[in-house]
Each structure stands twice: as structure tokens, then as C-alpha cells.
Amino acid sequence: MIKKLYLLFLVISFTSYSQKFDKKINELVSNYEMDVIELRHWFHENAELSNREFNTAKRIEQELIKIGLKPQNGIAKTGVVALLKGGKPGPVVALRADIDGLPVKERADLPWKSEMIGEYNGETVPVMHACGHDTHIAILLGTAKILYELKDQIPGTIKFIFQPAEEGAPAGEEGGAELMVKEGVLKNPDVDAIFGLHIWSQISAGQVYLRPKGIMAAVDEFRIDIEGVQTHGSTPWTGIDPIVTASQMINSIQTIVSRSMPLTEAAAVVTIGSIHGGVRSNIIPESLYMLGTIRTLDENMKKLVLKRLEKIVHNIAEANNAKAKITYLVSYPITYNDPKLYDEMLPSLKRINGSDNVNSMNAITGAEDFSFFQEKIPGIYFFIGGAKKGTDPMKAAPHHTPDFYVDDSAMLTGLKSMSTLTLDYLQKNK
């Protein structure tokens, strides 16, 4: 009986707490909306590539100082981290935003469109926030403003993580969430849970999508080098043809998923996206290389894909008297929402956004290096809509394209969600 009364007291206490803070959060979101939109426009107009986000990091640092925080810079090359200590003891929660742009030329006709240029793979390229990371930065800075206003009533500590190189570090460099973890971003103080979001151009603003367990795929990018013997195209029998060898490999690689994977359990994708070899129609080249990617949502299926890939590559090379080598370039784990934390925090998202606006989704085969944080501590990753209300989200340009666009109004959902998740987690776990 005493236990039941205690639990009832906790429920009543939390309900009273959440009602008070929900009203305050909505009020502060309204107060800071225009500031956050202006920040988003600046970051969009000044997009920078992975591990080169120098001005982006400087502006983030300036904004955090304005709030009253003491940021650390140079984390994982260009990352910025700041701590907000609440007025009461409690757990530590981290909030993450990725900050890099992409080598894409913007076509959208905006007064704040990006005209930035950068260097990618030794070439001068246009740079654009073609995946919405500009909104992520602005949302997290706005969330920091809101939570700083409430700091005296916060039972715990909040770590704001502005992470570079989510899109992948330049060749030969480390970067992103993996490097941040390696450098100890989840330590000193030890983080108990982490939350992150991603805006989605093909979902209506105001909507939230998530799921427990695997929400985004593990990714393994690879390179296959094939070495043959160069010869004249008129006498192929005097050489060893790496192009024919590669063609046979590609056909066989496509059977890995269609003939070896239990696809009723989880999705898997193997793609060869690039082939480089040869210079003339009448020369069989000495060598070539191919680039590909593997996407999996199940660890055992991932192991089987890698095993089958290596067997196919080496056996087909041997059958053609060629030599082949596989090199793995990038590997991200599955973006995995901790089921216990998901159950604990789902009511918070529904309460602040309205139950009808929070949706369950299927896992997708895109990948996210937020997964490196979730490997170490429980985390929740979710999507918010970016298409302007009243428009058809399915007609919106997809991510990583020149016409990509998300509406400013979408950021309100991010502000409310991140602030509420933080406060509720700290209150429930104090």
C-alpha cells in the first residue's frame, strides 16, 4: 500500500512538474523563434565542409558565450562542446547537433542561399547545407537558450555537443562522432543518455517520426582494387582483363542480398556506386577500382554480407587470373534507439507535440554516425518534418540535392522536443 501511494505521489508530482514546464517551454520557444531563424539563415549562408567548419564553430562558440556558457572548441578538430550545470544535483544528458555541409551547388532561390566554395578530394566545389544541418545547429543553440533560462530549476547537467564531419571526414583524416567519442566527449562528466534529431524534407513540419531499436542502418563503405595485365584490345588473350572481372563481380555481388539474406527479418543493401579504369576503347587496362557501400539493420546479416562479399571478390578474381583486394573505408554501427529509454521518453514527445503528430516509422537504410554515441550510452534519435505545412511533402526535393529545402517553421518542433526530452529525463532520473 505504501509503495502504491509513493508511486501515485511520483505520478502526480511529475504531472504537475511537466505542466509547469511545458507552458514555460512554449513561451520561451515563442520568444526565441526569430533569433533561431536568423541563426539558421546565417549557418545556411555560410556552409562549410566536414572538418573545415572553422567559421561555423566560431559562430557557435560566440552564441554560447552570449547565452552565458563557457564552450570548449577544437574538439575532434572543429567541434564545440558546452556544459550547463543545473541548480540541483542529478544525472547528465547530452544533446547533439551535426554542423557540416556538403559539396552541392544550391539552386533554391533564397535571399540566404549559400554561395560558399570549398575543397573536396582536391577539387574546388560549391558548398551547401543540403541535409539540414544548419537547422540542427540553430535548434540546439535555441535549446541551450531555453534551458539556460531554467537552469536554477534543472536537476542535473546538460552537455551540448556540436559535432563536425557527420558526412564523413576527408580522405586520410579522422573525424565525426567516432573521433569525439575517442577524445572523451561522453566523459568528464560521464553522460547518462543522449538525444539527437534530424530534419526531413519529405515530412510535414510539426510531425515527429521514430521507432525503438534500429532506426538507421549500419554502413560499411569499401573499395575493390583489381589488378590484371594490360594489352591491346584486339588481342585480349594476351592480357588479363580487369573490366570483365569487375563486371562478373558486380553481377555476383547483387545476389548477396537477393539470394543470401533473410529479408523478412531486416533490410540490406549492397551497391557498387563507382568504377574507375581504362582510358581508350582499344586498350585493356592494367587495373581498376570500384567503390561500394553495404547497408544493414542486423548485426548477423552484416557479418554474412561481408563474408559473402569477400568470397565473391577473391574467387572471381582467381577464376579470371586477376588479383583483387578489398579495403574498408568507413564503418558506422546501426543507429539504435535504446528500447527502455524509448519507452520512457515517448510520452514526452507526444505530450509536447500532440499524440497525433508523433508517428512510428520503419527503419531506413540511410546511416548516421550518431550511432557511435549510442554504442557507449543509451540514446534516442528521431526525425522532425521539414516541409512547409499545406504543401505536399512528397514533392519536396530529397536530401543531398541542389533543390533541397526545409521550412523555418519546422524548427519549432525541434526546439520543443529537445527541451522537453532533456527536462523530463533529468526529472525522472534525478
Image: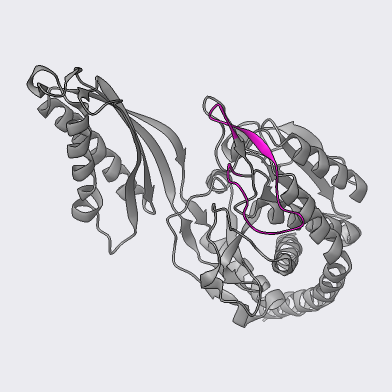
Q: Main secondary structure of the magenta part?
A: loop
Task: Left or right? Give the position of 336 relative to 10.
Answer: left
Residue at image position (54%, 56%) is: 399
Q: Is residue 55 magenta?
A: no
The image quadrant of residue 111 is bottom right
The image quadrant of residue 397 is bottom right
Identify the magenta region. Answer: 102-124
Q: Is residue 104 magenta?
A: yes
Residue 387 image offset from top left, x and y in percent: 62, 70
Count of marks overlaid on the render? 0
Residue 149 image offset from top left, x and y in percent: 90, 60
Task: Left or right? Give the position of 371 relative to 301.
Answer: right
Residue at image position (83%, 49%) is: 84
Q: Nearer the viewer, residue 426 or 71?
A: 71
Quarter the C terminus occupies: bottom right
Q: Nearer the viewer, residue 175 or 338?
A: 175
